[in-house]
């Protein structure tokens, strides 16, 4: 069988070579056909055009992978909230993604990237791109860059959604999302990625451990403090009462979707795919991203076994995410073993930070503050360990700047929303569940009897 298989291949190759030889023989026999060769060769893309095509493709592929992370957040949150609040979380995630897209077009992109020039924010105005059929200038298509940057904004807003689940009203949350995605995130993003003042200082955050994840984490922390804990979460004696999520399969699915999307998040942040070295770096980023997540999972599993004598699936899932957040600030320069260690420390942070927040009575439903804020800080601090062009001093300045601005502005916005329209549902509505109280559509009506017919 093997001989026949390769014999067939050899015969096919011989026939193919004879067919391919015919044009050459024809050119010899008919000299006038040779004059058509230069015109045909001109149809091939130049090296510059080829790089343009691959760079644009990187933005588009990376963009839809990061967009897929919106599904990951939705499934993770749906699995970690109680049954009576699942529809609400799904609605919030599809709504915040849509709001992020509109706000980033209307004001966010220009505020983040246009005329920053070493300052604190860019220009106000609606962003746009060339008309159809128009060749774009530069190294990539304009709309592809906007799309790739936009999906990052939605990620920051998703972090807030999970922390404040099960007790926040829908409309105040959506109004906060408008402010976060249209103004707060673009302003802070301009400081580094828009070539603002932190970029001039040498602050480094490759794909957004701080710029995306810690920003979302700071906003979530401010909201959790103003909103308060879920009723029944903490007893008067300081006891912590677990409120188990509705579906560990959904939470696990969400984690794997996020894990997959992170390859676009980190890999496409190389921002170029037109050369051998760029593609080689992207592959290195992919590998380090994956290894960091693996390190986070293993560390969380081992640590929970040692501390609690049982492995906690929610800690394992958040360990993966913490590992991914930790490596996001610098996924290129670490070696593979270092990437595992960076991710593993992220997993350790989650295991210790979750009970710490409970002691402080800060109710974070999905563990987003340990995963995105604390692991994001760790990842940003770790950059100088492998990137010699950065310094711990500059990294700390950046972390503090993002924290002070985002936490401070978020507190003000949450207090204004609380004073004007209220941000928390009533005790009766919280007990009933936000699926019924806020949106009138239950995720699992048969569990409550609403879907049963007489």
Image (cartoon, helix red, strand yellow):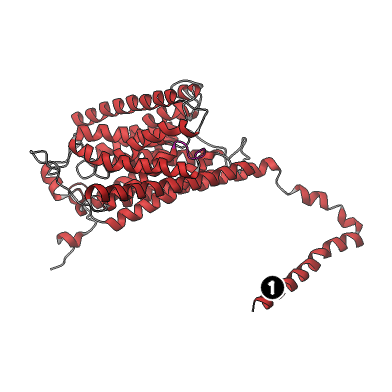
Magenta span: 329-334
- From the image, give the main secondary structure of the stretch colored magenta: loop
Q: In the image, is 379 to the left or to the right of 219?
A: right
Q: Is residue 411 visible?
A: yes
Residue density around tag 1, few if under 14, some if 14–19, many if 20 or more, within 10 Å:
few
Number of numbered discs overlaid on the protein picture = 1
Q: Is residue 312 above or below residue 389?
A: below
| Residue at screen point 38% across, 27% down | 399
Q: Nearer the viewer, residue 22 or 136?
A: 22
Which quarter shows the C terminus? bottom left
Place of residue 364 in the rendered image (x, y in percent of width and height, measured from the top left)? 24, 41
Q: In the image, is 441 to the left or to the right of 64?
A: left
Circle 1 residue: 6
Q: Give the SS element for disc 1.
A: helix
Q: Nearer the viewer, residue 226 or 115?
A: 226
Q: In the image, is 417 to the left or to the right of 110?
A: left
| Residue at screen point 67% across, 75% down | 5
**Residue that extends furthest to the front in the rendered view of this protein:** 306
| Residue at screen point 87% across, 59% down | 27
Quarter of the image for residue 349 reads top left
Which quarter shows the N terminus? bottom right
Q: In the image, is 40 to the left or to the right of 94?
A: right
Q: Is residue 101 visible?
A: no
Place of residue 111 in the rendered image (x, y in percent of width and height, measured from the top left)? 44, 28
Place of residue 353 in the rendered image (x, y in percent of width and height, measured from the top left)? 27, 39
Is 287 contained in the magenta span? no
Place of residue 382 in the rendered image (x, y in percent of width and height, measured from the top left)? 42, 33
């Amino acid at each position: 069988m093997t001989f026949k298989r390769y014999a067939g291949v050899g015969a096919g190759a011989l026939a193919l070579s004879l067919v391919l030889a015919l044009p050459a023989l024809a050119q010899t026999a008919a000299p006038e056909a040779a004059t058509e060769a230069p015109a045909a060769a001109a149809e091939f893309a130049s090296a510059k055009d080829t790089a343009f095509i691959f760079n644009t493709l990187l933005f588009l592929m990376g963009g839809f992978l990061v967009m897929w992370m919106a599904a990951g957040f939705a499934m993770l949150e749906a699995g970690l909230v109680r049954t009576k609040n699942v529809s609400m979380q799904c609605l919030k995630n599809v709504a915040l993604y849509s709001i992020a897209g509109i706000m980033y077009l209307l004001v966010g992109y220009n505020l983040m990237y246009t005329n920053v020039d070493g300052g604190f924010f860019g220009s106000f105005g609606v962003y746009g791109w060339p008309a159809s059929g128009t060749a774009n200038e530069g190294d990539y298509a304009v709309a592809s860059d906007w799309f790739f940057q936009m999906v990052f904004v939605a990620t920051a807003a998703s972090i807030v959604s999970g922390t404040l689940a099960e007790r926040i009203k829908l409309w105040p949350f959506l109004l906060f999302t408008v402010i976060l995605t249209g103004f707060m995130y673009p302003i802070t993003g301009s400081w580094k990625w828009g070539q603002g003042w932190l970029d001039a200082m040498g602050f480094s955050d490759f794909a957004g451990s701080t710029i995306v994840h810690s920003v979302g984490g700071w906003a979530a922390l401010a909201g959790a403090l103003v909103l308060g804990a879920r009723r029944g979460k903490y007893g008067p004696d300081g006891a912590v009462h677990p409120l188990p999520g509705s579906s560990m399969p959904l939470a696990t699915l969400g984690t794997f979707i996020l894990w997959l999307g992170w390859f676009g998040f980190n890999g496409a942040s190389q921002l170029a795919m037109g050369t051998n070295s760029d593609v080689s770096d992207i592959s290195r980023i992919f590998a380090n991203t994956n290894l960091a997540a693996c390190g986070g999972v293993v560390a969380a599993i081992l640590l929970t076994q040692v501390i609690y004598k049982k492995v906690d699936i929610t800690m394992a899932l958040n360990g993966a995410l913490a590992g991914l957040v930790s490596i996001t600030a610098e996924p290129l320069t670490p070696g593979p073993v270092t990437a595992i260690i960076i991710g593993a420390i992220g997993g350790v942070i989650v295991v210790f930070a979750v009970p710490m927040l409970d002691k402080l009575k800060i109710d974070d439903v999905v563990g987003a503050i340990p995963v995105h804020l604390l692991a994001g800080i760790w990842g940003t601090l770790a950059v100088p360990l492998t990137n010699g062009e950065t310094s711990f001093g500059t990294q700390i300045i950046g972390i503090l700047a993002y924290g002070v601005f985002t936490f401070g502005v978020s507190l003000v916005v949450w207090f204004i929303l609380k004073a004007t329209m209220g941000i928390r549902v009533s005790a009766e509505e919280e007990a009933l569940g936000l699926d019924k109280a806020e949106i009138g559509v239950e995720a699992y009506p048969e569990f409550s009897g609403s879907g049963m017919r007489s």
